[in-house]
Image: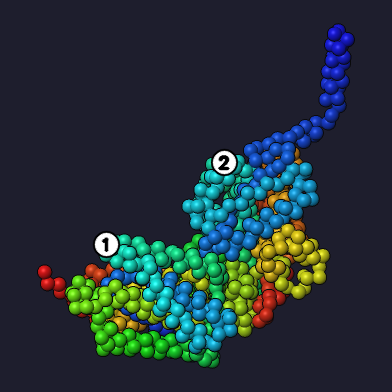
């Protein structure tokens, strides 16, 4: 009895000696968890439109899941598996709220990753920030997601509409500083965001250069009348801020009425298959648009190791999805950004640390265009702000010039 | 000046679209005295059928006629199966069924054919360079006028047309003189679905085919039909052209593009308050 007590005392002494010898930094490695994380797994919530009018985007949610499958098969992140819970909101903001509450309150996820669309994200913006749950890398280009002062729990990912608008303005000032600009925009926040960035980019010259600005509503059957007005204004530069259907109409109508301006098309509508081909591939020759991801159909990438790695992942983990679909590149790349955030977070898997790590990224991703980096800081909640321009040659987009943006 | 003329012609082209949808609305109103809110979605679905046939390698006019026939049968079937049970129910019940049909057709089309826009071929020659009005616009206006004449002749000069109008206006008396009122309603649905199919196939090359193709157009179609008089096919067509041109001219020169849609809504409200029978409609007097 006495002997064992003494032994215990010795043990205690040894223990405190060891404790004193351990450098203080190691205590940071002490495991800290918020709901949704433990020694074995990290729970990540996601909301995507798998049904309804925007269901084409559902491919993104599936691709993200397929990428996490790959990470899990390779041993997870710092030894923890990712448990990915993805729900369908049908692009209906009311349902987004319901699904988000389910993820946060019932499933108790560590964070909500990549909810898709501006209206759905707007609907949960305040809720996520009140609950202090990360609304991380939202899938929309609205500029309002980069507001760390007022909304420290929300962060975008893709280039925002304003920075893209500034890129077109920069190119315009370089190539046609005396141009007369006509703008067609959707009459909502998305359209206004783009036009604001474009005008900011033109600076003092905006007033003199923009000769006509017309809008359309999503309920308008066509934008024919607007195109006639723009042509009549004498504009020789066209900034086209439209969603796919109206973009195709505008491209076709411009050709029909014989208007051949320097045509900037917002990246929202630069998919070859769903806009450029329906518009009539030859009608769009010369159109300029901005890109940040590698186009999987572009032959210049198809022999690169990055493309081959992506294609191998597709074949193994996402075999039903199309190798031509850009959304699979998008999902793959955005999932890589999150994996990096979680790796950096180490054993401190609190929601606060997730946001802290998300705000200290500087990473290149294999399927981002060469030279473009995912960069954030405590005051910079805009991960991707660089893009490169490409010109439609009648068959495909051909990249040219430098990388714009910071 | 050139811009003004172009605006007018662009207005006529879209007016033709509104007119063809307005015609289908007049048709259903003539035969049932209801306004079918699912008219646009049915037309859209018919157009998808045509698209699927074309994808399968059918020639254009073959697919066109087959689609019109299938749509006629489909419209008839909808009336027989879904609307017959609520034939005698209050108007509101019918309206709810119409809205249900709208949602069903929209979701079905999205589920089967997905939501990406699809180019739809035009049977008319391609436009060559800058023109005031494209061959397709002209062609579709011509097709619509042919449909109008056929419809007018049918309602005015055939005994079935007469029976149909009677069944809609006074079902009890019609039944007493031996008209099979219920089948007349079915026939009306079939015909309006067929007209809708023609409208859809003429509209799709201009606005691109997707499940939401007819959403906004139906609203303008209502304005057109109400402006001309909901019981008058000619009125609906003229109403369509007026709405199309008015909307463009006001949008381009007076109120700006932000308020373009409001033109249609203001028109609907104004007509309903000032002249409920429309420009060319008949005033119905009911003897008590």
Q: Residue reaching furthest top?
A: A2
The residue under the point 28% across, 83% down is B160
Judged left or right of residue A247, residue A359 is right
Residue A396 falls in image quadrant: bottom right
Mark 2 in CB contact with mark 1 (< 8 angstroms): no
The residue under the point 73% across, 58% down is A317
Residue A213 at x, y = what percent?
49, 72
- Of tags 2 and 1, the one toward the viewer is 1
Relative to A177, residue A5 above or below:
above
Residue B161 at x, y = what percent?
28, 83
Q: Residue reaching furthest left?
A: B288
The residue under the point 21% across, 74% down is B175
Relative to A300, residue A385 above or below:
above
Judged left or right of residue A293, residue A197 is left
The residue under the point 63% across, 57% down is A61
Question: Element under label 1?
Answer: loop
Relative to A283, residue A44 above or below:
above
Tell me the CA gap for discs 2 and 1. Answer: 44 Å
Q: For residue A106, which numbered disc appears in the image?
A: 2
Residue B72 at x, y = what percent?
40, 79
Dot 2 falls on which chain? A
Between B53 and A18, the residue placed more toward the observer is B53
Residue A180 falls in image quadrant: bottom right
Question: Element under label 2?
Answer: helix
Q: Quadrant of the C terminus of chain A?
A: bottom right
In the image, are marks 2 and 1 on the same chain? Answer: no
Judged left or right of residue A138, residue B270 is left
Residue A163 falls in image quadrant: bottom right
Judged left or right of residue A64, residue A116 is left
Between B149 and A165, the residue placed more toward the observer is B149
The residue singled out by tag 1 in the image is B90
């Amino acid at each position: 009895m006495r002997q064992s007590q003494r032994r215990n005392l010795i043990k205690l002494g040894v223990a405190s000696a060891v404790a004193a010898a351990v450098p203080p930094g190691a205590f940071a490695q002490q495991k800290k968890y918020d709901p949704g994380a433990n020694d074995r797994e990290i729970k990540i919530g996601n909301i995507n439109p798998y049904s309804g009018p925007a269901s084409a985007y559902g491919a993104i949610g599936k691709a993200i899941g397929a990428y996490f499958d790959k990470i899990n098969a390779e041993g997870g992140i710092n030894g923890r598996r990712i448990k990915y819970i993805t729900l369908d909101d049908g692009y209906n903001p009311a349902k987004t709220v319901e699904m988000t509450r389910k993820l946060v309150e019932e499933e108790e996820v560590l964070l909500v990753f990549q909810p898709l669309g501006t209206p759905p994200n707007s609907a949960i913006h305040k809720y996520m920030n009140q609950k202090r749950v990360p609304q991380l890398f939202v899938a929309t280009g609205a500029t309002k997601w980069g507001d760390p002062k007022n909304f420290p729990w929300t962060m975008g990912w893709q280039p925002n509409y304003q920075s893209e608008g500034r890129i077109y303005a920069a190119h315009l000032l370089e190539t046609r500083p005396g141009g007369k600009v006509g703008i067609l925009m959707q009459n909502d926040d998305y359209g206004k965001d783009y036009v604001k960035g474009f005008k900011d980019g033109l600076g003092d010259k905006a007033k003199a250069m923009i000769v006509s600005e017309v809008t359309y509503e999503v309920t308008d059957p066509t934008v024919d009348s607007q195109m006639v007005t723009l042509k009549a204004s004498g504009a020789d530069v066209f900034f086209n801020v439209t969603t796919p259907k109206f973009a195709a109409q505008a491209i076709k109508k411009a050709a029909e009425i014989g208007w051949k301006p320097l045509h900037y098309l917002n990246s929202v509508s630069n998919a070859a298959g769903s806009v450029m081909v329906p518009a009539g591939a030859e009608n769009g020759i010369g159109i300029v648009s901005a890109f940040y991801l590698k186009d999987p159909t572009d032959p210049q990438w198809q022999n690169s190791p990055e493309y081959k790695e992506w294609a191998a992942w597709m074949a193994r983990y996402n075999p039903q999805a199309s190798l031509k679909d850009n959304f699979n590149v998008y999902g793959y790349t955005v999932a890589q950004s999150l994996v990096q955030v979680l790796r950096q977070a180490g054993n401190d898997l609190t929601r606060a640390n997730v946001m802290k790590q998300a705000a200290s990224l500087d990473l290149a991703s294999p399927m981002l265009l060469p030279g473009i980096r995912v960069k954030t800081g405590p005051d910079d909640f805009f991960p991707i702000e660089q893009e490169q321009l490409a010109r439609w040659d009648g068959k495909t987009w051909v990249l040219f010039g430098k990388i714009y943006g910071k | 000046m050139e811009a003004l003329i172009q605006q007018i012609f662009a207005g006529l082209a879209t007016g033709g679209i509104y007119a063809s949808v307005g015609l289908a609305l007049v048709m259903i109103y003539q035969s049932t005295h209801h306004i079918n809110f699912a008219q646009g979605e049915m037309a859209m679905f018919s157009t998808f059928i045509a698209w699927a046939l074309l994808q399968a390698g059918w020639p254009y006019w073959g697919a066109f006629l087959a689609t019109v026939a299938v749509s006629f049968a489909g419209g008839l079937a909808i009336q027989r199966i879904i609307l017959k049970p609520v034939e005698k129910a209050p108007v509101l019940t019918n309206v709810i069924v119409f809205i249900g049909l709208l949602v069903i057709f929209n979701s079905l089309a999205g589920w089967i054919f997905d939501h990406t826009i699809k180019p739809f071929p035009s049977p008319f020659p391609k436009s060559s360079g800058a023109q005031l009005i494209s061959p397709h616009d002209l062609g579709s206006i011509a097709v619509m006028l042919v449909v109008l004449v056929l419809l007018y002749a049918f309602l005015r000069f055939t005994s079935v047309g007469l029976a149909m109008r009677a069944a809609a206006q006074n079902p009890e008396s019609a039944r007493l003189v031996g008209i099979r009122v219920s089948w007349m309603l079915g026939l009306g649905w079939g015909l309006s679905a067929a007209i809708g199919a023609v409208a859809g196939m003429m509209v799709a090359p201009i606005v691109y085919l997707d499940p939401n193709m007819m959403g906004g157009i139906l609203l303008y179609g209502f304005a057109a039909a109400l402006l001309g008089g909901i019981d008058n096919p000619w009125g609906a067509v003229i109403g369509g052209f007026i709405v199309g041109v008015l909307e463009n001219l006001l949008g381009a020169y007076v109120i700006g593009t932000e308020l373009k849609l409001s033109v249609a809504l203001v028109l609907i409200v104004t007509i309903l308050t000032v002249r409920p029978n429309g420009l060319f409609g008949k005033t119905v007097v009911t003897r008590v």
